[in-house]
Image (cartoon, rainbow, N blue to C red):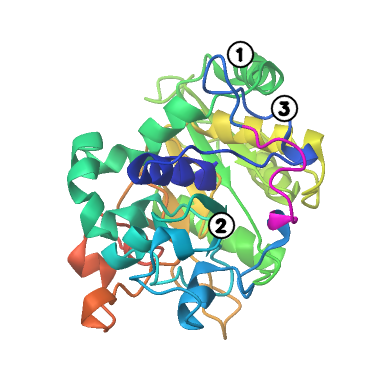
Amino acid sequence: MLAIASTFLYALLSGRVMLVNVPQEQEGLFCEPFPGTSWVLPDGFPEGSPMKLYAGAPESYVNMLKNNVIRYDTPASSLPAHVYLHLEQIGQRLSDNIFCDDDQRLLGKFGWMILKSDSYFAMALFLTPMYDKELARMFPYKEAVFHHLGRYLLHPTNRVWGIVRRYYEAYLAGVDEKIGFQIRIFPERPVKFENMYDQLTRCIKEQRLLPELGKAEPAANTSGDGKVKAVLITSLYSGYYDKIRGMYYENPTKTGEIVALYQPTHEEKQEYASNEHNQKALAEIYLLSYWDKIDMSAWSTFGFAGVKPWILLRPDWDKEVSQVACVRSTSVEPSLHSPPALGCGAKKEVDVAVIKPYVHTHTTKTHIS
C-alpha cells in the first residue's frame, strides 16, 4: 500500500505512467482504480526478468552513475533502454542519488523505469526542490498526503470489504469507544512475549488507554456505567488477546465501563505467499482505520486511522526491554523509515528534520508531543 501510493505520486510528479507488477499472492486485494483501463503490468513484459533486479545490480541507477556508465550530461539517445531504481529500506538508507534535482533530471531522460520499493518514500519527494511548487499545490496540508493518495488509489475488492463490513457490523458498530492495538514482532529484532506484553500493559496504564481494574463491583451510579470500549488486537499471536481479555473478564473496572476484546485472526506466522492471508491482513488494516485510539509497534506499517498513534518503542540493540513503554506520534502520516542524508550539491549530510520539519522519519515521528 505505502509503496504503491508513493510510486503513484512519483509518477505524477515525473510525468510517467505507472504499471504495477501484481504477483499471485496479491491478486484480489484492490480494485482497479482507473475505469476503462488497467494498471497491471502484463505477463512477460518487459523481457529479461526485471523483477529479479536487486540493489547491487549493474542496471541500478546508483551503480550506473558510480561506474560512469551514465553521467548527468549523458543525452537521452545514449542512455540504456531502462533504469532500475531500488528504494527498499532494509539494511540501507534510501539512496541520496535520487532526491536531488540533477538526479531527477537525468532519471527523467530514461524511457522506462523499473522501481522496486517496500517503503513509504512519498515524503522523501518533498526533499527534491524541483517538485516543491507542484507538491505545495497538491498537498497544502502536508499531514494528509497518504490520506489523499490512499483514498484515491486503494479501494479494497468486494471480498476484502465484505470481511471488514461483516466484522464491524457484528462486533463494533454500537460501541462507545474503539481502541486498537497492533503488535508486530520483527524476526530480525525478536522480543520475548513476556517483555512485549509488559511493555504493552505499561503503555496502557501510563497513557490511560483502558479503564483501571477494580477489586469490587462499582456502584450502580458510577459515571462510566454501561459504556462499552471495544479493543481490537491485530497480531500474528493470540497471547496478547488472551491475557488482556482475561484481565477484563475476571475483574470489574473502577468506572463501571465494559471492555470487550476482539481479535479477528492469529495466524502465528506471516504467510507472504498466501493470497488468503494477505486478504485477511488488508481487512484488519481497514478495520483499524475506524479506531479512535491506536497503540502500535514501532516501524510497523499496519495502522492508518487518521489519528496520532502511540508507538511501542523498540528496545535498544543491546537491551531486551525498552525503558520507555510508548510515546505519542507527532503525525498521522506514515514515517519515512530510511531518510536520505540530503547532501546533494553541498556534499554533506544534513538533518532532514531541520530542513523539512514536516517530513517525519522514524525518529522524529516518535518524539513525545
Quarter of the image where the C terminus is located: bottom left
The quarter of the picture where residue 99 lies is bottom left
Kindly report which numbered mark, 3 or 2, lies closer to the viewer in this rendering. Answer: 2
**Mark 1 and mark 3 residues within 8 Å of each other at the beta carbon:** no
- Evaluate if marks 3 and 2 touch, with contact meaning CB atoms under 8 Å apart: no
The spot of residue 330 in percent (x, y) is 30, 53
Q: Within 10 Å of the Cα at label 3, are there few (<14), some (14-19), or many (20+) other Cα atoms?
A: some
- Part of the protein shown in magenta: 40-50
Question: What separation in Å lies between label 3 and label 2 (alpha carbons)?
Answer: 29 Å
Residue denoted by label 1: 169
Q: Which residue is mark 2?
A: 82
Residue at the image point whose x is 62% and y is 74% from the top: 58
Q: Residue at x 74, y 32 (%)?
A: 27
Q: Give the quadrant of the N terminus.
A: top right
Looking at the rendered structure, the secondary structure element under dot 2 is strand
Nearest to the eye among marks 1 and 2: give it.
2
Circle 3 residue: 28
**Picture coordinates of residue 367, whole percent (x, y):** 31, 63
Q: Is residue 34 left or right of residue 107?
A: right
Say above or below: 337 vs 147.
below
